[in-house]
Image (tube, rainbow, N blue to C red):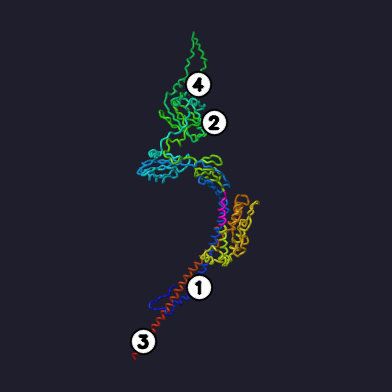
Amino acid sequence: MAGINIPGVTDQYKTNDTVEKLMKVERIPLTREQKQLETYKAEKDAWRDINTKLASLRDSTKTLYSFENPFNNKLTTSTEEYAITAEANRSAGIQSFKVDVIQPASSDRFLTQELENDFKVPAGTYVYKVGEKNLNMNWKGGSLKDFSTAINKRGNGVIKSSIIGASNGKKSLLIEAIPTGKENQLIFENDAKTFAFDSGMIDKVQPSTEQFGQTQNEIAPVQPIEYEESPHLPPLSLTKTKLNEETTSVTVEPRGAYQIEIPSKIKDKSNLHVQFTIKATEVTDITPEINKSLIQPEIPDAGFAEYSGIVISNMNSDTNLNLPDIPPEPLEPNNTDAVVYAVMSDGTEKLIQTPELLTGSLQEVDVNLKEYSDIKAIAIRNRSTGIELEVSNFSALDPSTDLGYGPKNPISVADDAIIKYEGITITRPSNKIDDVVPEITLNLHDKTEKTATISVRPDKDASKDAIIQFVGQYNQAVAELNILSQNKNEIIDELDYLSKEEKDAEREKLGMFATDFSLTSIKSNMQSIVSAGYNFSDQAEITMLSQIGIATNAGGFSGGYSQSKLRGYLEIDEKKLDSALENHLDDIRQVFGYDSDGDLIVDSGIAYKLDKQISAYTQTGGILAMKTSSLDSKIKSSESRISKLETQMDAKEAELRNKYSQMEGSLNSLESQQNSISNFTRQNQRSN
């Protein structure tokens, strides 16, 4: 508390100094508690520092034995990197193989003709399809640039667009499909198709089709199949069909049927569709004529003869007409759309759904051969009684390619990648091929001028970097353990990687936990783990770290003994490490972590054991967490005591200053009275 100021009165009795001296004695318990609090906080920071160092070491050890360990990393090289590169998964085998890139996969990239700078793209619904993806865009109309921007905003992995400067004052619009491959053809629909024609991007072409079913020799009778029909209907017959040679169409009368075998060259291409048309015409129904034949004849009575009252009946005719007891029901006219059937190799038939056969209209039928993988022929069965069918010849085509139009200014067209792998020709729709070589992805960029050799080898640099990082983390953890458990300045002086400020900070912690057994225990256990041998196999040539140029204590390397080498730090002989990585990489991997009991789970090795050892200290609820938790309780209690003592000190100081202030006031009053008396006496003496 600041000293008391009494207006007009000086601190002539030094009461402020007196109070401060008295309070200094009173504050001794508070000062002691504040120093204790600082000690607690420093200890907590020290435990947190060692926890950080050990946690970093643990992370490094897990890297060395986990599934993602660097010893399984693979590198690939290609002798023709401009044309083909490769990526190898961790499970890929060490190997080399040869690949020729005949052609990389490409996408449709179409360009308009040269358009004026002020060309306007008309409003409309623009539909672009690429494979199974599509882009539907409602365009309000605008400039070529705005149209291109709108496509790119909505492209969504389907298409993209750009403006290309043509001759002076003119531009061209480029639209390209993003997916590659022959099946990912760029298709224009609705107003996109109209605009593509108008802008000179595409032009009409004749589709390439395979025709069949045009000659009498191709027309064959159908196999008899039981239907739930009246037995009085005539059977389906080839005789009720007729080939029209001028139109190569087939007229199928009521109850007519025929089938056309699909040629092998068409049947073997599952991407093809068979298309034809059917025209239904109403004709005189055949059921009335059939019903007439079903009416049973009336046989007259045999009659009788009468003579002189004697009646003699004639015998009934014994002629057998094989008439049924009950006359059959008359047939009803029957018209059906179940006309087209897929005839399978085993003789069975599957109905092919067709549009409704409206009389007088031409209906198109499309048969996707992919949906009938074992199809042999197509059968036409006209089970109607009053409808005549006219069936066109058959055309086989690929609707995804035979669009009736083609690019007028193509920069590239959709096509599959073609490669030769070890002499075997392979096609794929993408330039990223991951199903030819196990665990390896091939990336195609261009056609190879000569055969490329792809090599797969271990990534030894990644393994070396991981080991060096592990040694660095290990040494930092050991250094922190040494600083906290020993009170020797040379421990800090030896750490050349620390700055002066960092060394000064470390000196504050020197020997802080010299009596704590847990630090010396973990250091001793860590040293035992890294110096032990691990005989994971009878054929193993590397079983301990010292064999790959990593050792502790001293004597393993040149330079003789020194105190610093006896503090538990690991040292690396880089040449020896490089040699071991080159020749014994798998042994090194297993030294850090291996399966000792055959359950395919790592349960031994340097990295595995260090991880388990350190986990006991760094995990939630571990040794270090318990120590910091204990300090948290002490810090909280200390802060509570300090708060209480500070309140007491404030009250005590206020009390002392009040007392001394009253005393000083009394003394000042007495002094004033004395001065008054002295003045009165002097005045009386002068008057006498």
Foreground disc of the pair 1, 3: 1
x and y, in percent, of residue 450 in the image: 53, 43
Q: Which mark is residue 28?
A: 1
Q: How far is disc 4 from disc 1 in space, using C-alphas? A: 132 Å
**Above or below 247: residue 632:** below
Disc 2 target residue: 346
Q: Which mark is residue 680?
A: 3
* Predominant secondary structure, magenta span: helix
Q: Which span of residues is magenta-colored?
A: 457-469
- Which mark is first along the chain, 1 or 2? 1
- Which mark is first along the chain, 2 or 4? 4
Q: Mark 3 falls on what kind of element? A: helix
Q: Mark 2 falls on what kind of element? A: loop
Q: How far is disc 2 from disc 1 in space, using C-alphas? A: 107 Å
Foreground disc of the pair 4, 2: 2
Look at the numbered discs 4 and 3 and tell me whether their residues touch, using CB distance below 8 Å: no
Give the residue type at disc 3: Phe
**Above or below 209: residue 628:** below
The residue furthest front is 449
Foreground disc of the pair 2, 1: 2
Give the residue type at disc 4: Asp
- Given residues 94 and 297, the one toward you in this image is 94
x and y, in percent, of residue 403 in the image: 43, 36
Foreground disc of the pair 4, 3: 3
Where the N terminus falls, by quadrant? bottom left
Disc 4 target residue: 325
Look at the numbered discs 1 and 3 and tell me whether their residues touch, using CB distance below 8 Å: no
